[in-house]
């Protein structure tokens, strides 16, 4: 029997990387200052997220795994409300319906925490436990009860690559939070969480790459302000994963920005390589629409060509100056 939550899971949960994105965003929403992510086998068999956030009240622990209200399903048909609501209240219910979950949480001021085990959305056990403040959630055997979805997952290597990208982007966009990421018992990185972007990059990127990044200080450019870091042409990569753009400090994905960046590197990079960047572009709010996708990682520029040309010219200028 297929449940409505499993159907929703098809929409919200594309694979282990989207589970991680949802859970880390929940930890961020809970005001965590430290987030620990651990995965095994590309997240297919094991994902653990521990945060030191506000925790979940014992009275609410079952409720957070329920779909908030069925009226939401009707509202989702209205595209406008989809954009504003996103999938509010659906992530945990969706993830729970297609995995085995163990969650432990304690709120501030309480002596004990609460622990809940679920399988395929059914509660197996609930008990009082000793715990530190915050939430730990373990997801085992994603899609164990939906064989078609399970088969659809990519290789461990491919899933790990997507997870690396998600965690890297989250860690870079939240430099005020300390992230610790462990993959198959190997420490991948720890970021300091002191709001310093270059320290985050130093923690995540290989040392030689970091040392060769070109810094673009924030300037009074008109009409747009571009700041951040770009790689020297010799550090091209095989994919776009490390083309990281913020627009008005919001992490976005943009074909348009990627293409403009790549154009500036054309002839400087070997064929089929992609540059690395962490760039923030400040655009007057009236010139963008951030609501074109529910996850709000996409952005639409009303004057796309103008932004593209501006970015391309600025990067070309910096590369010419910086690589002389
Ligand atoms: P949403 O984030 O859209 O509200 P979720 O299904 O992701 O929906 O989470 C449901 C609720 O569970 C959240 O609104 C929050 O109250 C609670 N919750 C989830 N994760 C955490 C966490 N790490 N710390 C504290 N509360 C959490
Ligand atoms: Mg959420």
Image (tube, rainbow, N blue to C red):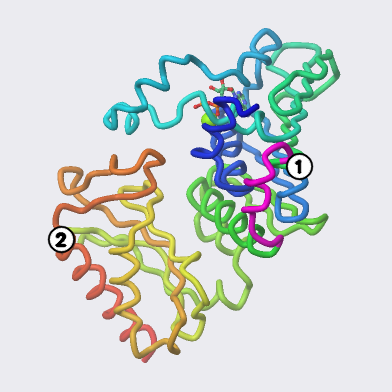
Residue at image location 59% in from the left, 52% down from the top: 167
Image height check: is 107 above or below 34?
A: above
> Does residue 200 appear to the left or right of 303 in the view shown?
right
- Dot 2 or dot 1: first in sequence order is 1
Residue 59 is one of the magenta-drawn residues: no
Q: Position of residue 296 (x, y in %)?
A: 37, 42
> Does residue 287 appear to the left or right of 95 in the view shown?
left
Q: Position of residue 252 (x, y in %)?
A: 38, 52
The residue closer to the viewer here, 298 or 265, is 298
Q: Which residue is mark 2?
A: 222
Q: Which secondary structure lies at badge 2?
A: loop
Confirm or reject: label 2 Cβ below 8 Å from ligand 2: no
Q: Which residue is mark 1?
A: 141
Residue at image location 59% in from the left, 18% down from the top: 66
Q: Which residue appears farthest toward the front when viewing the image?
A: 1
Q: Which of label 2 and label 1 is nearer to you?
A: 1
Q: Which span is picked out in magenta?
A: 144-156
Mark 1 crowd level (few <14, some 14–19, many ≥20, 10 Å Cα): some
> Does residue 273 appear to the left or right of 108 in the view shown?
left
Q: Quadrant of residue 266?
A: bottom left
The residue closer to the viewer here, 206 or 153, is 153
Q: Which secondary structure lies at badge 1?
A: loop
Residue contact at pointers 2 and 1, CB within 8 angstroms: no
Q: Position of residue 254 (x, y in %)?
A: 33, 58
> Does residue 91 appear to the left or right of 276 in the view shown?
right
Mark 2 crowd level (few <14, some 14–19, many ≥20, 10 Å Cα): few
Q: Quadrant of the C terminus?
A: bottom left
Q: Position of residue 314 (x, y in %)?
A: 25, 73
């Amino acid at each position: 029997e297929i449940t409505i939550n499993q159907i929703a899971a098809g929409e919200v949960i594309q694979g282990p990387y989207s589970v991680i994105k949802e859970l880390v965003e929940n930890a961020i929403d809970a005001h965590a200052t430290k987030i620990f992510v651990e995965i095994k086998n590309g997240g297919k068999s094991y994902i653990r997220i521990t945060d030191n956030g506000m925790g979940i009240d014992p009275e609410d622990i079952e409720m957070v795994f329920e779909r908030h209200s069925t009226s939401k399903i009707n509202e989702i048909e209205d595209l406008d409300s989809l954009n504003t609501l996103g999938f509010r209240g659906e992530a945990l219910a969706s993830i729970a319906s297609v995995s085995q979950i163990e969650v432990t949480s304690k709120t501030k001021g309480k002596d004990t925490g609460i622990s809940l085990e679920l399988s395929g959305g059914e509660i197996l056990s609930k008990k009082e436990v000793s715990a530190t403040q915050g939430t730990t959630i373990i997801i085992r055997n994603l899609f164990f009860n939906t064989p078609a979805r399970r088969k659809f997952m990519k290789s461990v290597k491919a899933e790990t690559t997507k997870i690396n990208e998600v965690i890297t982007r989250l860690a870079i966009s939240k430099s005020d939070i300390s992230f610790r990421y462990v993959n198959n018992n190997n420490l991948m990185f720890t970021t300091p969480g002191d709001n310093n972007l270059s320290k985050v990059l130093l923690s995540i990127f290989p040392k030689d790459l970091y040392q060769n990044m070109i810094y673009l200080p924030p300037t009074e450019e008109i009409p747009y302000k571009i700041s951040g870091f770009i790689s020297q042409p010799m550090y091209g990569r095989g994919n776009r994963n490390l083309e990281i753009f913020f627009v008005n400090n919001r992490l976005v994905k943009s074909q348009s920005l990627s293409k403009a960046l790549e154009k500036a590197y054309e002839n400087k990079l070997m064929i089929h390589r992609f540059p690395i960047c962490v760039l923030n572009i400040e655009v007057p709010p009236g010139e963008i629409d951030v609501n074109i996708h529910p996850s709000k990682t996409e952005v639409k520029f009303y004057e796309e060509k103008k932004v593209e040309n501006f970015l391309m010219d600025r990067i070309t200028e910096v590369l010419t100056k910086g690589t002389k």
